[in-house]
Structures are given as C-alpha cells and as structure tokens.
Image (spheres, rainbow, N blue to C red):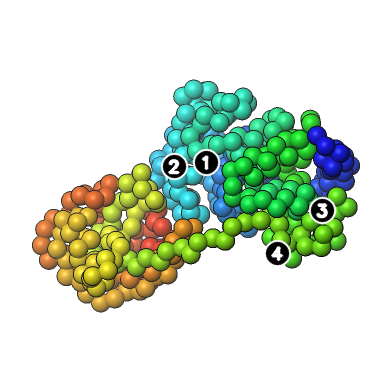
Amino acid sequence: MNNDLINLNKRISSDLLPWFEQNQRPMPWRKNRTAYRVWISELMLQQTRVNQVIPYYLRFMEKFPSIKILALSDLQDVLKLWEGLGYYSRARNLHKAAKTICEKFGGIFPEDPDLINQLPGIGPYTTAAISSLAFNKDLAVVDGNVIRVLSRLLAIDSDVSKSSTKKELQTIADNLLVKGKAGKFNESMMELGATICMPKNPNCKECPIIDNCMGYKIGDPSSFPVKKKKAKIPHIIVGAAVVSDGNKILISQRRENQMLGGLWEFPGGKKENNESIKECIARELLEELGIIIEIQEKIITVNHAYSHFTMEMHTYWAKIKSGEPKAIDCKTFKWVKLDKIRSMPFPKADIKVLDVIS
C-alpha cells in the first residue's frame, strides 16, 4: 500500500468512522441487526432510493419476519409485497434463497462468505455487505456511492464502467478497509457518498476527509467518476387489452424467466412497424391466448421508464368474439373479479391502468 493510501486509511479510521457514528441516518435495518435484515435491505436498496425502500422494508419484515416464514410463503405473496419496487428477479431469488437456507442450513443464515455467495441472487457485493455488516468479516463493499467517493479521493481518471477500473477500485477499497471494523468502514463510505459526496453539487466543506481528496484539490470533484456517455435507450410502443366478461377481467401471468416474471398483466405486446395499435392488440391476444377480440373504447395511455428502455402502453377495453383462452405465450391466465384484482401482483404500468378501471 503506497503512502497516499496509508495516510487515507489513517484518516478514515480517525475522522470518517467517528463522523459516521455522529451523522448516520436512522434506518430501520440498522436496528436489531441480523443477517436476514441486512440481506433484505441490501437487495431492496439495489438500484432503488432509500426513501422508497423504507416503507417496503417495514411491510416486508412485518409480513415475513424470519427466513423460515419467507421460505414457507407463496411466491405470489412475496411478489405482491414487492409490487412497485421493480427488478422483480430480486424477489424471486430472495424466495429461492430462503428455501435453500432452510433446506441446507436449517433456516440459519450461513456466516461463511463462500456459502453466502452461492445463494440464489447473491453476488460478491451482497456477500461482502452481509458478511461485514452482520458478521463483521473483513470484506470491503464497492457500490455506486463507494465508487464515487474513491474516484474523487484518488482522482481516478479511468472509465468506471470498465472491468479493469472496477477491479482497481475493489483493490483500493480492500486496502483501505479498517481491519476489525469492516461493517463501520463500509457503512461510513456508503453514507459519505449518499449524503456528502453526492453525484451533483457535493458538499465538500462538510466532508470529514476533504484534506485527502485529490478531486477537491484539483478543483473539480464533480468530474469524477469518469463514465462513458450512455447510449440513447430505445422507446417501444405497446398495446394491451382489458378483456371483460361481465364483472370479470382476463389477465395473464408472465413466465418466470421473462422480465417481470411471475407478475400478472393485461395481455398485449409490442407494436410492429407495419401495424396500428388496435391491430397490434388483436394480433398479440391471438398469439398469446388464442382468442379473437372486439376492441372497444380506449382506457389510457401509460408512459413508463424501465432501466434499459422507455414504454408507451395504449390500453383498450375489449370483448372476446371467438375462441376460448389458452396459455399459448404466457405462463397461465385467469378471470378475476374487478374487486379482487388488486390482490394480484402487477407491474407499475398495469397498476396505472387499474387506477383508472377500479
């Protein structure tokens, strides 16, 4: 470890850790800390803001207070509680991992990082987070906040999206780790990034380790981390039908290996270049469910942004003209009474349709 890292390690131990103790935000997962509570919070916090996660976390822990209760629960109940949080593979893997922990470890979360890393949906970052925060293992976490802090502290001018830069940052974090205080080190670095060393307009004057920040010394900390420009994300147009029969609505379930797997939706799909929205809806319902429909009045156009594309969904009322629904291009389907439909887990875009019709 070079002199810069040695000095920075000392400052982290003498200044950053005490700063964290005095300034940490009150978080529900920081109380009565267990591996299970850390695991749930870390998964929820991936790609999701803290203020959005807190109510989800509290509801989840109330419904599933232990690994065993989670493992015995129906996946649909887990997905329903996750509804609106996005990245639903997290919920599916969480459920699988809970079952694995019960089957292999008697419902007790394993302490060995190698065993943690083998659980469904858990990679090196989550392994390090659980190991350090719950068991105080000397493993450094590197999330978006830590990447930003380290890039500014050391004025790292290589693209942080490159695997070589990510490895470099992990090595730096490993070297800076305050041995025996891994949990506090990791939390203090993440807290510094979330509350002081923010992406825009960092509050450098309040930073407890500003004297060691090379980005600040050169006068432009906001230029770090260096990232290549993101490519323009695609925009897709989707048509969907709310097929009714009396007081019942036809919904289909997405296959678990698909995006939003396991969730229910109003059947439909992506519009082709050579067709109208109504033609799209008619084609999609024939392909997905084997039915010919009569499309009626429009309900709503929903605009929604996912991480890698934006979507414009045009939704219409419809009736079946001929055919009986079959699960051709979906996991299954169901007729549901309108007053019962909200008990099922739906994607955010479909919830906006539900807000109009129910």
Circle 2 residue: 92
Q: Locate residue 89: give its quadrant.
A: top left
Given the current orientation, which residue lies at the most extreme bottom position?
Answer: 297
Q: Residue at x 11, y 58 (%)?
A: 323
203 relative position to 288: left or right: right
The N terminus: image quadrant: top right
Q: Amino acid at mark 2?
A: Arg
Q: Residue at x 54, y 36 (%)?
A: 122
Mark 4 and 1 residues: CB-CB less than 8 Å, in contact? no
Q: Nearer the observer, disc 4 or disc 1?
A: 4
Q: Position of residue 61 (x, y in %)?
A: 57, 44
Mark 3 and 4 residues: CB-CB less than 8 Å, in contact? no
Disc 2 to disc 3, how far (Cα)? 42 Å
Label 4 residue SS = loop
Label 1: how many Cα within 10 Å (few below 14, some 14–19, many 20+): some
Q: Amino acid at mark 1?
A: Phe
Circle 3 residue: 214
Q: Nearer the viewer, residue 64 or 174?
A: 174
